Image: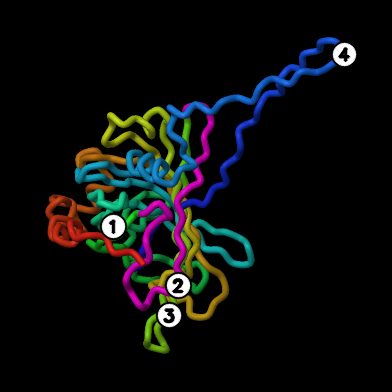
């Protein structure tokens, strides 16, 4: 199974300031006094403020069920030419627990299904345009597992197979009352068996909501939309061997707080493939409760 963790790295573009007028008196220019910052407005350049704003938009400040639903497309890329191969119907199911140090532990699992580009139906087999073979499709069920969201991104997993790990949160991009907060996870997973393929992860997600909601201390959870991109090696089920190229994905969606709010096409597939998870996602995550309430230990 391929682990999607993690988000889109974006650059924060500074706001444009207006030129202050110059006052002339007795042939001398008098510059206006510098503006005094409004200390009553939370500053998203503060990592603690940014983390809470991100959690309010992307998740919740309590342990309610939070679902990331997205629809997207997976591409093959050879010699910088991209070809759409199949659709993606993505569901990530979370519960969040605030820790004493300000970070958040989260229990999560993922149910993602690959679909026919024309019909939207779940693929059983895939006619591989690169090999001419018909491949049996493997869909994604990841977790349940525990992760830790910190001010710097998702904490490095306690797993010796994970190499070259980096993650980021922010900086926020603000335009009027719109705010975008990007996240990223980049890692290499190396298995001890020499013949096992190395897994490279490059995941980028951006959440978008209103600045008013993101900074509102009265809100436990606020609406947000999601944009996702990743770059990865060929899917193992495609049997590409040493053929050159790689894959990339793009998807978009939004945060939900109920299984009933998921689209009917996603629910139909999930019920067929992973019925016990989709019928009781809270129950599936509840088994991790003891881990979630243990104190955080981050290197």
Going 35% across and 42% down the picture, which residue do you hit?
52
Foreground residue among 99 and 16: 99
In whole angstroms, how far apart are the C-alphas of marks 1 and 3? 22 Å
User: Looking at the rendering, which quadrant does residue 133 occupy?
Assistant: bottom left
Which disc, if any, is residue 110? 1
Instruction: Tell me if label 2 and label 3 are in contact, CB under 8 Å.
Output: no
Q: Quadrant of the N terminus?
A: bottom left
Upstream in sequence: badge 1 or badge 2: 1
Label 2: how many residues lie within 10 Å, few (<14), some (14-19) or many (20+)?
Answer: some
Secondary structure, mark 2, is strand
Which disc, if any, is residue 27? 4
Which disc, if any, is residue 188? 2
Nearest-to-viewer mark from 4 and 3:
4
In whole angstroms, how far apart are the C-alphas of marks 2 and 3? 11 Å
Instruction: Tell me if label 1 and label 2 are in contact, CB under 8 Å.
Output: no
Q: From this view, report whether residue 218 is shown above or below residue 253.
A: above
Q: From this view, report whether residue 98 is shown above or below residue 199.
A: above
Nearest-to-viewer mark from 2 and 3:
2
**Outermost residue, bottom direction?**
194
Residue range corresponding to the magenta coloring: 150-177
Going 21% across and 40% down the picture, which residue do you hit?
258
Please say whether residue 276 is visible from this viewpoint: no
Q: Position of residue 70 (x, y in %)?
A: 37, 47
Q: Position of residue 62 (x, y in %)?
A: 22, 42
**Number of numbered labels in the structure image:** 4
In whole angstroms, how far apart are the C-alphas of marks 1 and 4? 70 Å
| Residue under pointer 3 | 197
């Amino acid at each position: 199974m391929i682990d999607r963790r993690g988000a889109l790295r974006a650059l924060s573009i500074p706001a444009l300031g207006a030129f202050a007028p110059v006052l002339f008196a007795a042939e001398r220019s008098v510059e206006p006094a510098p503006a005094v910052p409004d200390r009553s407005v939370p500053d998203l350049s503060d990592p603690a403020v940014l983390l809470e704003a991100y959690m309010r938009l992307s998740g919740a400040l309590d342990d309610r069920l939070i679902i990331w639903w997205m629809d997207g497309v997976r591409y093959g890329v050879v010699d910088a030419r991209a070809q759409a191969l199949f659709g993606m119907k993505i569901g990530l199911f979370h519960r969040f627990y605030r820790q004493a140090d300000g970070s958040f532990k989260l229990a999560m699992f993922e149910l993602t299904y690959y679909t026919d580009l024309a019909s939207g139906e779940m693929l059983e087999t895939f006619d591989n345009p690169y090999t001419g073979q018909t491949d049996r499709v493997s869909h994604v069920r990841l977790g349940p597992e525990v992760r830790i969201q910190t001010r710097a991104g998702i904490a490095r997993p306690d797993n010796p197979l994970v190499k070259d790990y980096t993650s980021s949160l922010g900086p926020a991009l603000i335009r009027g009352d719109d705010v975008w907060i990007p996240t990223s996870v980049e890692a290499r997973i190396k298995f001890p068996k020499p013949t096992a393929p190395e897994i490279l992860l490059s995941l980028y997600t951006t959440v978008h909501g209103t600045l008013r909601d993101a900074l509102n201390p009265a809100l436990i959870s606020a609406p947000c939309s999601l944009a996702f991109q990743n770059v990865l090696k060929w899917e193992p089920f495609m049997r590409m061997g040493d053929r050159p190229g790689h894959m990339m994905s793009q998807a978009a969606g939004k945060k939900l707080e109920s299984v009933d709010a998921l689209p009917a096409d996603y629910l139909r597939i999930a019920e067929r493939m992973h019925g016990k998870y989709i019928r009781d996602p809270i129950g599936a995550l509840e088994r991790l409760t003891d881990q979630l309430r243990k104190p955080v230990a981050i290197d």
